[in-house]
């Protein structure tokens, strides 16, 4: 039975892997090594979907491999309902999202770790260990002291198995939104102990020993069907093995190489016992079978994300109508696969030339696997098997040609691999902008610039902080705002004209972000606006310098009423944000309550990202007046004057009255520091008359102090405009 199942030479003691093991150990090993009379070895398969069926074998993974996993436990789909919208005539929308918890067995022997995970061919977990969707992953490596998973234990109680010796993973609340709210096809990159010594481990588990049977080219192996003997027989086709009887049983050895001293067998002896070798004592046979000469090898290629690869031999037997393909469920490089195939093809043709040899004496050191010479025949021969007879010793010899040590260069071919983009944390900036003249002037224009560095990022949910809690505010979506920081100091500017030669350098947060130059007409219409600190700047030209660094030239400074900020300049490291449609417009009338903080939570954010609102109240803050002037009244006094501006209309136009916008026209004129004025005047027109007596009193009260004016709006006051300084002279006010 065993000799037939292990399938090689047959009844000889020692020799090829199948026949030798079978003849030596016989039926006693059928139940341990063979398993059943029908033997089918492991086959290479396309990566299948994760399944669960009774009796389905869990593969044994050696080295590095990719397996689909077997579902051993799962919950029903969990439904989450979220309602948004409604109010102010807007429809109410209810969305449904689903999640699932499940456990999948990966390997019937312990592993070291789990690497990448694919879902429907796309990366669910990257090489950095980052899950790319919501959920929790726990890996159980199959150690002898492995404890039950807490989720499975909670569901199954005291009857929950620990699955010791079996590696498995548990997904808890795996979000299914990215997979059409269904469980995707999962596959896993597995790292176990090195596969180079797979022969040693299989032999040891079956009570056999091994020696010099390493498989250094093998990076991984998936054994999901067939007996251990079938696995050894399959490996033997690529990496020759020999079964050698010893005083401790059968030993599996790698094929010996010819040394400098090749022994010579004794002359052939003839006897009449049996038909082995006939009576002549030696019989030469040539019976090469084309079916045993592989012309192609299918394997798993790690450079193709462990998808099947195919390498072909340079030639195959002439006249062969079919091309046998050797399917090997091992992980090999393309070069190693082609090299092993070429050697296997040569060996398969060599094995067709055999020599039966009888002799009455033998050196004890010569046995199966030995390379020998025979009298009167050229070349070298490898002892395939031997058997002791009453008349002597019978050998079966196979023609031996030393395999080439040269590697066969090979191309693995083109394969698609899902990009591994690590999940990145959210960047948040929240600010208020001046009213642009559209819509209501009483509604704050608050925006959130939500972005992230180059990497996997699907947006963030925005909240306003309220005491110890957070109130939902908006969703950013996956579109990144364009922002970064100033690299160099941006000097002050009077913001009166286009500065064609002026430039600044910015480092963008997202290296893949792009900026575009615009024409002068586009600049006039408000294109390419940057918020640098609190100043709004426009740029006409831009040049990429690499690594997300851009040089911006042709600057318009102090836009949108930010002339004061332009006059101050900005240090290196100041925040920069492009004001375009990628900003998140916070809901109208957003009330930040007792805090000026907005929080963002994205997938990769372990904690909320919090930003403080910049320039609160800026939308409804009046612009500071312009064009200060004073006129003597002819009696020693002076009339101070200025020109008002209106929110939404930032131009300095001569002889043109800007619309008021505010409910009433009011101004505040002060003496001294604006934060702590010495004297204040409230006026309802853009002028203030100071008679000579009052000027003298002010000069005595605060000689050298400044006079300034700011507009009082319906909701706030503007920044101050410097008017003049009280002169030490007795006859005038200095401008």
Image (tube, helix red, strand yellow):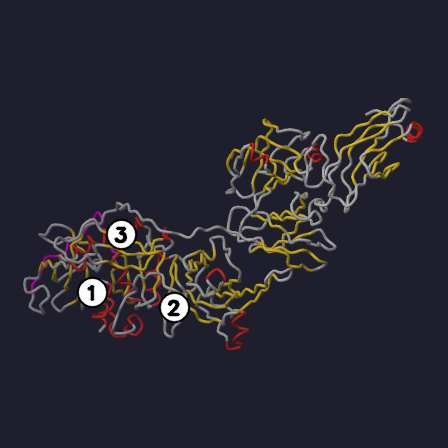
Q: At 84% from the left edge and 28% from the top edge, which residue is drawn? A: 725
Local secondary structure at mark 1: loop
Q: In this view, does 358 lie to the left or right of 221?
A: left
Q: Mark 3, residues whose alpha carbon is within 10 Å: few (<14), some, or many (≥20)?
A: many
Q: Earlier in the sequence, mark 3 or mark 2?
A: 2
The numbered dot on residue 8 is 1
Q: In this view, does 430 lie above or below 118?
A: above
Q: Is residue 328 left or right of residue 550?
A: left
Local secondary structure at mark 3: strand
Q: In this view, does 102 lie above or below 121?
A: below
Give percent across and percent down for residue 336: 30, 50
Q: Is residue 266 magenta?
A: yes
Q: In this view, does 729 lie above or below 642?
A: above
Q: Is residue 380 magenta?
A: no
The numbered dot on residue 58 is 2
Give percent across and percent down for residue 299: 30, 56
Give percent across and percent down for residue 1: 22, 74
Distance of label 3 from label 2 (alpha carbons): 28 Å
Q: Which residues fall within the magenta stretch? A: 255-270
Q: At 33% from the left edge and 68% from the top edge, which residue is drawn? A: 207
Give percent across and percent down for residue 583: 59, 47
Q: Nearer the viewer, mark 1 or mark 3?
A: 3
Dividing the picture into quadrants, the one containing residue 90 is: bottom right
| Residue at numbered disc 3 | 311
């Amino acid at each position: 039975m065993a000799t037939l199942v292990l399938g090689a030479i047959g009844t000889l003691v020692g020799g090829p892997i199948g026949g030798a093991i079978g003849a030596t150990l016989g039926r006693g090993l059928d139940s341990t090594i063979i398993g059943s009379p029908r033997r089918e070895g492991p086959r290479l398969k396309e990566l299948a979907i994760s399944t669960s069926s009774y009796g389905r074998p869990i593969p044994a993974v050696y080295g590095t491999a990719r397996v689909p996993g077997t579902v051993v436990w799962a919950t029903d789909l969990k439904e989450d309902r979220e309602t948004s919208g409604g109010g102010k005539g807007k429809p109410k929308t209810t969305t449904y999202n689903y999640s699932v918890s499940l456990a999948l067995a990966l390997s019937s022997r312990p592993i070291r770790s789990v690497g990448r995970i694919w879902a429907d061919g796309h990366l669910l977990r990257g090489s950095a260990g980052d899950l790319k969707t919501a959920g929790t992953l726990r890996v159980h490596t199959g150690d002898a002291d492995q404890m039950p998973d807490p989720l499975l234990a909670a569901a199954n109680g005291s009857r929950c198995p620990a699955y010791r010796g079996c590696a498995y993973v548990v997904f808890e609340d795996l979000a299914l939104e990215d997979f059409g709210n269904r469980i995707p096809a999962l596959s896993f990159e597995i790292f176990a102990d090195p596969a180079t010594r797979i022969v040693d481990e299989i032999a040891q588990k079956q009570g056999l020993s091994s020696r010099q049977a390493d498989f250094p080219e093998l990076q991984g192996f998936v054994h999901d069907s067939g007996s251990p003997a079938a696995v050894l027989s399959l490996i033997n086709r690529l990496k020759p093995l020999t079964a050698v009887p010893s005083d401790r049983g059968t030993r599996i050895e790698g094929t010996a190489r010819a040394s400098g001293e090749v022994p010579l067998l004794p002359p052939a002896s003839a006897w009449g016992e049996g038909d082995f070798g006939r009576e002549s004592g030696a019989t030469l046979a040539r019976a090469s079978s084309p079916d045993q000469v592989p012309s192609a090898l299918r394997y798993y290629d790690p450079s193709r994300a462990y998808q099947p690869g195919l390498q072909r031999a340079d030639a195959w037997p002439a006249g062969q109508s079919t091309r046998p393909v050797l399917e090997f469920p091992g992980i090999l490089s393309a070069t190693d696969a082609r090299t092993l195939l070429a050697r296997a093809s040569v060996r398969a043709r060599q094995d067709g030339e055999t020599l039966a040899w009888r002799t009455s004496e033998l050196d004890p050191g010569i046995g199966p696997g030995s390379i020998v010479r025979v009298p009167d025949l050229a070349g070298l021969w490898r002892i395939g098997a031997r058997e002791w007879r009453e008349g002597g010793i019978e050998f079966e010899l196979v023609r031996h040609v030393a395999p080439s040590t040269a590697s066969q260069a090979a191309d693995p071919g083109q394969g698609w691999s899902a990009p591994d983009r690590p999940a990145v944390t959210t960047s948040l900036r929240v600010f208020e902008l001046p009213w642009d003249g559209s819509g209501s002037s009483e509604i704050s224009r608050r925006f959130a610039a939500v972005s992230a560095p180059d990497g996997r990022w699907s947006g963030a949910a925005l909240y306003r902080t309220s005491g110890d809690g957070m109130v939902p505010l908006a969703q950013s979506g996956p579109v990144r705002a364009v922002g970064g920081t100033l690299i160099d100091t941006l000097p002050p500017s009077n913001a009166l004209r286009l500065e064609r030669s002026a430039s600044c350098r910015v480092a963008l947060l997202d290296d893949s972000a792009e900026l575009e130059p615009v024409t002068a007409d586009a600049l006039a219409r408000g294109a390419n606006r940057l918020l640098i600190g609190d100043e709004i700047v426009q740029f006409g030209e831009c040049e990429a310098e690499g690594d997300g660094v851009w040089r911006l030239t042709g600057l318009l400074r102090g836009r949108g009423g930010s002339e004061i900020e332009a006059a101050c300049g900005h240090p290196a490291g100041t925040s920069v944000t492009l004001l375009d449609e990628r900003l998140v417009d916070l809901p109208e009338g957003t009330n930040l309550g007792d805090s000026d903080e907005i929080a963002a939570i994205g997938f990769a954010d372990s904690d909320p990202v919090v930003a403080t609102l910049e320039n609160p109240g800026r939308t409804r803050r009046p612009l500071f007046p312009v064009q200060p002037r004073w006129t003597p009244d002819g009696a020693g006094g002076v009339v101070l004057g200025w020109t008002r501006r209106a929110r939404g209309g930032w131009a300095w136009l001569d002889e043109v009255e800007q619309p008021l916008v505010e409910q009433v026209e009011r101004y505040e004129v002060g003496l001294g520091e604006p934060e702590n004025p010495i004297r204040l005047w409230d006026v309802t027109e853009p002028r203030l008359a100071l008679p000579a007596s009052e000027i003298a009193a002010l000069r005595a009260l605060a000689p050298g102090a400044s006079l300034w004016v700011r507009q009082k709006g319906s909701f706030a006051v503007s920044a101050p405009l410097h008017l003049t300084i009280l002169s030490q002279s007795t006859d005038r006010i200095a401008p």
